[in-house]
Image (spheres, coloured by chain):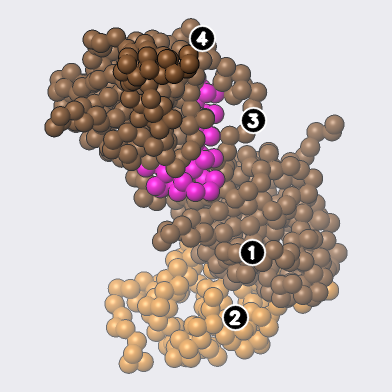
Chain colours: A orange, B brown
């Protein structure tokens, strides 16, 4: 934690406000997966490939995907004959403006660290250890 | 003949060398090394289709994040995100394994997405590892699968293939992908001394004719690709008709005394070379030619590689010639281009566009020698360029004057030195220093004037401040003696024989 940059109190407050508007982001895995979809809004991939690209366990990825689909954040095109699924991020509705801002912030090293800091207290997630998340950053395209 | 269904790429200049576009449904392989411009070309192909031709498209990426593509495309003014929202374009990020499987499936999710927006075009960025190693049978079958899958949907596809081996010297051995693809476009980065220029070549394209050879292209901020046709002077009926001289109209030179030597002026569409060593007054003549055009209300254009525009204006002012006013009025255009890194196709395109728009009656190029040192006089580049310039000027009926620096200080070994193109030129004016006593005097000779009488008499001329150049009146009659009155004709240093010598020779002949 000591190597994390100091957090501006005002930014932290803003991040907490944005996180409160985005309940689907429960931990690092959800955040990193959403950032991936933010950068690749229409992806044709298998869950295994997604797990490798984002750097998390396949099970965690699958759970996060299900929660995004339920929450209307993600659309998945199914085809029983194919292992790959087409995922389309749905960020257009106005209520997702805050989430868009959050993802833009999470696309930078500093922003991501600040969001993790805000996520840690009271947001249980298998991938919520910021140190672990930082290590996984390299997997993200 | 049925009307051909050609897909316009919309890329500036490319459809021209493709003679209108690419047959619909063709699989187009764009090959080139890293940084050659393959991705930009593929993305522009899909973007132009969606934005200009109502042909939605799909972009398939493997390594580049779509987010970065959005950002980079904005540099060219292409708002891909907006087009995605409008369902005119879709960008799909996937892996090569998935794409390979997808294209083998009749119910492909990817092609289903394409169908949803009515896609007519697709760009796949980076097919090399998708189809296996270049040149192997695995590559051949992999590419075949890809090609079949795309054709099934009647998509016109651009596939970018990284081919580092084809950069520089192509081995001459075709890759299997090249034989399966319908169209092969090769992009290269070519070394030109220490500079690098981009070239594009249509290697093949099934079902159509196209303009062969290596053309130049640039990647331009705010626009995208700009292809410049290889400099050439293709035969066109209107050009050839224009080359026949109008026998009445003359374009006066603006040099007092010179018009009498050139039968009143140059013909429209004619090519005149003024040859002489540096400092002999060629640029002065050029400025006077342009100024005379302005005085007569004729649009006049000067291309300089030697002097920048302010310098030309200053030099004209020193001769009390006001070029600034006609420049401001738009009747005269002065253009300067530094010759160091001239790209001949780009430069010619610039001239061509300017001539088409401005329609000048008079044009000056200052100078051919600088073009020669920039483009090299060996090989075909300079020759093709000069041919194309002449054809362009004839087509637009501009009387063009080309200054040429002849290296000989006294006398001339040849009219155009190593350029060896005097046969293309209609009129040649030689300017020489002539050493009389301890001074150099300036001589001018009209050495060639096609379709006109010419006496090839050398006249003295002078350049005076506030006056410019003028040809001095000849006070002595030209010698009218026959060749028999001279000795040493073949040596080109004849000496007139004395009457005694003539009589003696005649007496010997009588005996």
Q: Position of residue B353 (x, y in %)?
A: 48, 32
Looking at the rendered image, the disc whose residue lies closer to the viewer, 3 or 4, is 4
Whether the residues at callouts 2 and 4 have beta carbons within 8 Å, the answer is no
In this rendering, position of residue A17 left or right of residue B177: left
Residue depicted at x 34% and y 45%: B338
Place residue B1 in its image quadrant.
Answer: top right
Looking at the rendered image, the disc whose residue lies closer to the viewer, 2 or 4, is 4
Cα separation between marks 3 and 4: 23 Å
The disc placed on residue B387 is none
Query: What crowding class fits label 1: few (fewer than 14 Cα within 10 Å), some (14-19), or many (20 or more)?
Result: few
Res B127 visible: yes
The residue under label 3 is B235
Q: Nearer the viewer, residue B241 or B220?
A: B241
Q: Secondary structure at mark 1?
A: loop
Q: Is residue B190 above or below residue B12?
A: below
The chain carrying label 3 is: B
The chain carrying label 4 is: B
Place residue B129 in its image quadrant.
Answer: bottom right
Q: Earlier in the sequence, mark 4 or mark 1?
A: 1
Q: Secondary structure at mark 2?
A: helix
Q: Is residue B11 above or below residue A100?
A: above
Query: What crowding class fits label 3: few (fewer than 14 Cα within 10 Å), some (14-19), or many (20 or more)?
Result: few
The residue under label 4 is B247
The disc placed on residue A53 is 2
Whether the residues at callouts 2 and 1 have beta carbons within 8 Å, the answer is no
Query: What crowding class fits label 4: few (fewer than 14 Cα within 10 Å), some (14-19), or many (20 or more)?
Result: few
Q: Position of residue B74 (x, y in %)?
A: 48, 54
Q: Position of residue B495 (x, y in %)?
A: 33, 25
Q: Secondary structure at mark 4?
A: loop
Looking at the rendered image, the disc whose residue lies closer to the viewer, 2 or 1, is 1
């Amino acid at each position: 934690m000591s190597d994390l940059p100091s957090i501006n109190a005002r930014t932290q407050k803003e991040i907490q406000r944005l996180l409160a508007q985005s309940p689907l982001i429960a931990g690092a895995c959800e955040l990193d997966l959403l950032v991936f979809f933010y950068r690749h809004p229409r992806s044709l991939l298998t869950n295994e490939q997604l797990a490798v690209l984002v750097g998390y366990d396949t099970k965690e990825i699958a759970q996060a995907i299900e929660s995004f689909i339920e929450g209307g954040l993600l659309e998945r095109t199914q085809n029983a004959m194919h292992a790959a699924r087409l995922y389309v991020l749905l960020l257009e509705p106005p209520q997702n403006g805050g989430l868009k801002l959050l993802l833009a912030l999470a696309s930078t090293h500093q922003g991501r660290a600040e969001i993790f800091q805000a996520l840690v207290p009271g947001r249980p997630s298998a991938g919520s250890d910021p140190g672990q998340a930082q290590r996984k950053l390299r997997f993200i395209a | 003949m049925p009307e051909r269904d050609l897909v316009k790429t919309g890329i500036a200049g490319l459809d021209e060398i493709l003679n209108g576009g690419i047959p619909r449904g063709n699989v187009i392989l764009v090959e080139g090394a890293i940084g050659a411009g393959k991705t930009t070309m593929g993305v522009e192909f899909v973007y132009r289709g969606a934005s200009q031709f109502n042909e939605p498209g799909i972009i398939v990426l493997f390594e580049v994040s779509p987010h970065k593509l959005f950002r980079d495309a904005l540099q060219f003014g292409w708002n891909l995100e907006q087009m995605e929202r409008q369902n005119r374009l879709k960008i799909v990020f996937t892996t090569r394994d998935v794409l390979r499987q997808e294209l083998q499936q009749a119910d492909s999710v990817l092609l289903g997405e394409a169908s949803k927006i009515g896609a007519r075009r697709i760009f796949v960025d980076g097919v090399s590892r998708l189809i296996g190693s270049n040149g192997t049978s695995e590559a051949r079958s992999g590419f075949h699968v890809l090609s079949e899958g795309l054709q099934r949907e009647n998509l016109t596809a651009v596939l970018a293939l990284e081919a580092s081996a084809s950069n520089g010297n192509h081995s001459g051995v075709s890759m299997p992908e090249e034989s399966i693809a319908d169209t092969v476009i090769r992009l290269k980065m070519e070394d030109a001394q220490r500079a690098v220029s981009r070239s594009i070549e249509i290697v093949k394209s099934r079902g159509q004719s196209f303009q062969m050879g290596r053309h130049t292209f640039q990647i331009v901020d705010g626009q995208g690709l700009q292809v410049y046709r290889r400099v050439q002077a293709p035969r066109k009926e209107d050009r050839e008709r224009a080359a026949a001289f109008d026998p009445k109209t003359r374009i006066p030179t603006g040099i007092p005394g010179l018009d009498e030597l050139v039968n009143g002026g140059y013909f429209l569409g004619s090519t005149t070379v003024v040859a002489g060593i540096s400092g002999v007054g060629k640029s002065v003549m050029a400025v006077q030619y342009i100024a005379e055009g302005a005085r007569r209300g004729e649009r006049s254009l000067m291309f300089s590689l030697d002097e920048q525009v302010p310098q030309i204006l200053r030099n004209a002012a020193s001769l009390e010639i006001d070029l600034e006013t006609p420049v401001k009025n738009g009747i005269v255009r002065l253009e300067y281009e530094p010759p160091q890194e001239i790209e001949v196709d780009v430069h010619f395109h610039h001239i061509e566009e300017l001539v088409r728009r401005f329609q000048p009656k008079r044009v000056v190029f200052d100078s051919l020698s600088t073009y020669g040192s920039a483009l090299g006089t060996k090989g075909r580049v300079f020759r093709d360029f000069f041919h194309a310039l002449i054809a362009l000027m004839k087509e637009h009926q501009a009387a063009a004057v080309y200054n040429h620096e002849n290296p000989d200080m006294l006398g001339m070994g040849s009219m155009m030195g190593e350029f060896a193109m005097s046969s293309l030129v209609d009129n040649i004016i030689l300017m020489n220093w002539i050493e009389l006593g301890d001074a150099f005097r300036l001589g001018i000779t009209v050495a060639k004037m096609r379709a006109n009488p010419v006496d090839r008499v050398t006249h003295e001329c002078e350049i005076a401040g506030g006056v410019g150049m003028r040809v001095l009146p000849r006070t002595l009659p030209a010698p009218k003696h026959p060749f028999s009155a001279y000795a040493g004709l073949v040596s080109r240093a004849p000496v007139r024989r004395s009457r005694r010598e003539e009589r003696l020779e005649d007496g010997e002949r009588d005996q």
